[in-house]
Image (cartoon, rainbow, N blue to C red):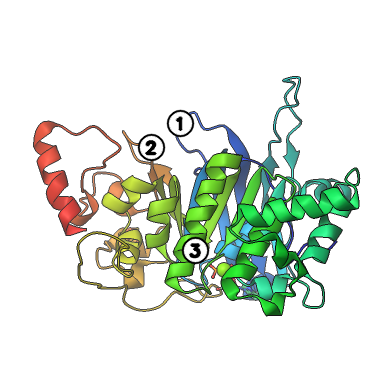
Amino acid sequence: MSLPGASAMTSPGSLAASGPAPDRGVDPVLEIRGLCVDYGFGDDAAHAVADCDLTLGRGRVLGLAGESGSGKSTLAMAAIRLLRSPGVITGGEVLFHPRPASDGEPATTLDLLAAGEEELRAIRWSEIAIVLQSALNALNPVSTIGAQFDELLATHRPELGRASRRDRAGDLLELVGMTPDRLRSYPHEMSGGMRQRAMIAMALALDPQVMILDEPTTALDVVTQREILEELMGLRDRLGFAALFITHDLSLLVEFADDIAVMYAGRLMERAPAASLFRSPRLPYTYGLLHCFPPMHGERHRMDGIPGSPPDLRDLPPGCAFHPRCQWAIPRCRQDVPKLEPLTGSHREVACWLHRDNATAPPELMRPDPAVAQPRTAAVSDTSAERAV
Ligand SMILES: Nc1ncnc2c1ncn2[C@@H]1O[C@H](COP(=O)(O)OP(=O)(O)O)[C@@H](O)[C@H]1O
Ligand code: SF4
Ligand SMILES: [Mg+2]
């Protein structure tokens, strides 16, 4: 069966962080290293993904956030070799580390960017699965949900007979809160939320190690969105897959992700444990994003937003691409591109000149990090910082 909506490749783990990231004992399932993707060629090329490093840890959830057009989908689709023309991967490697064999023998790591079609077919859907924003485009409109499950299982689990396939499909629907009688429905007979649930059930059908969720609930109302996300995270706890969860809404990730990476104009700009990023952002862009969306819980605060709009990737400003919109830019920001680098004494990374070479960052970007033990006096200011967020 052609993969509904996109395809799948997976492995369990957690979305953790990037590049030369500090070693936090993460057991990586997917490692993206130096990934570069362009749309077009030569001087007109848009550098949609520029030298990105990202590691997804086994069994964890890594959120990838950023405004629309920042390169999130391009990064994910390129990593699993589903990028469509005119996208071109111009550099990097994507290492998939399968589960160790049942006898404990370590499995062979595969570079997805160097793999042949045969190798990719073997891991898409069964090891790495993807769920996209629109299940309507992903599901076959002229087949029932049951027929689509049957085709998927018959292709990838040939040892199962028809009755076993039907039972498995029913179980999968129940897993995502649907009744097995929905197997007789066509996609157009179901609500948007149900279609998204059916897509998630299909993505789980082969027990993948990695789920890539690209704005999986963006088209849904907030109540359905929340229900589905809670179910998904419950499934992650039970089934142990890792998830790369992509969204433009940073506030969603704060509750569901273990780690969050923030992308701007094709580059990863900040990466931190979710609580640290939420309570104590170090990057002006992250700070702006946190003030764009109302939090799901807690006190109300003013929504300032971020002035201006994202740059044209074919004509990026010099230096830090965010500088024309950054309220705290310093002269160096207009000249040099900051690299994502570890922040001393923490499990986080940031690409910002305010945190380099003795520059002075504003108090808004220096709040105490909840993941780092604070001296007693600092703990007091942490409370006031939380109130302010
Ligand atoms: N098919 C395409 N042709 C040309 N440029 C594209 C295409 N798709 C995406 N891009 C460029 O890549 C950038 C990143 O797109 P995308 O990865 O979809 O961002 P996101 O998922 O963060 O919204 C866009 O801003 C656009 O400039
Ligand atoms: S490097 Fe400069 S322009 Fe970029 S986010 Fe930091 S302060 Fe702002
Ligand atoms: Mg996208």
Beta carbon of the mark 2 residue lies under 8 A of ligand 2: no
Q: Is residue 280 visible?
A: no
Question: Which residue is label 1 attached to?
Answer: 24
Q: Which amino acid does the dot numbered 3 rest on?
A: Thr
Q: Earlier in the sequence, mark 3 or mark 1?
A: 1
| Up/down of 305 relative to 178, above or below | below
Cα separation, mark 1 vs mark 2, equals 7 Å
Q: Position of residue 66 (x, y in %)?
A: 45, 64
| Labelled pair 1, 2 in contact (Cβ < 8 Å) | yes
Question: Which residue is label 3 attached to?
Answer: 247
Q: Residue at x 34, y 50 (%)?
A: 277
Q: Is residue 182 visible?
A: yes
Q: Earlier in the sequence, mark 1 or mark 2?
A: 1
Q: Quick one: quadrant of the N terminus?
A: bottom right
Question: Which residue is label 2 attached to?
Answer: 347
Q: Which amino acid does the dot numbered 2 rest on?
A: His
Categorize mark 1 by other alpha carbons within 10 Å: few (<14), some (14-19), many (20+).
few
Locate residue 43 relative to residue 218 in the image: left or right: right
Cα separation, mark 3 vs mark 2, equals 22 Å
| Up/down of 257 relative to 71, above or below | above
Q: Position of residue 24 (x, y in %)?
A: 45, 31
SS category of the residue bearing label 3: strand
* Ligand 3 sits in quadrant: bottom right
Beta carbon of the mark 1 residue lies under 8 A of ligand 2: no
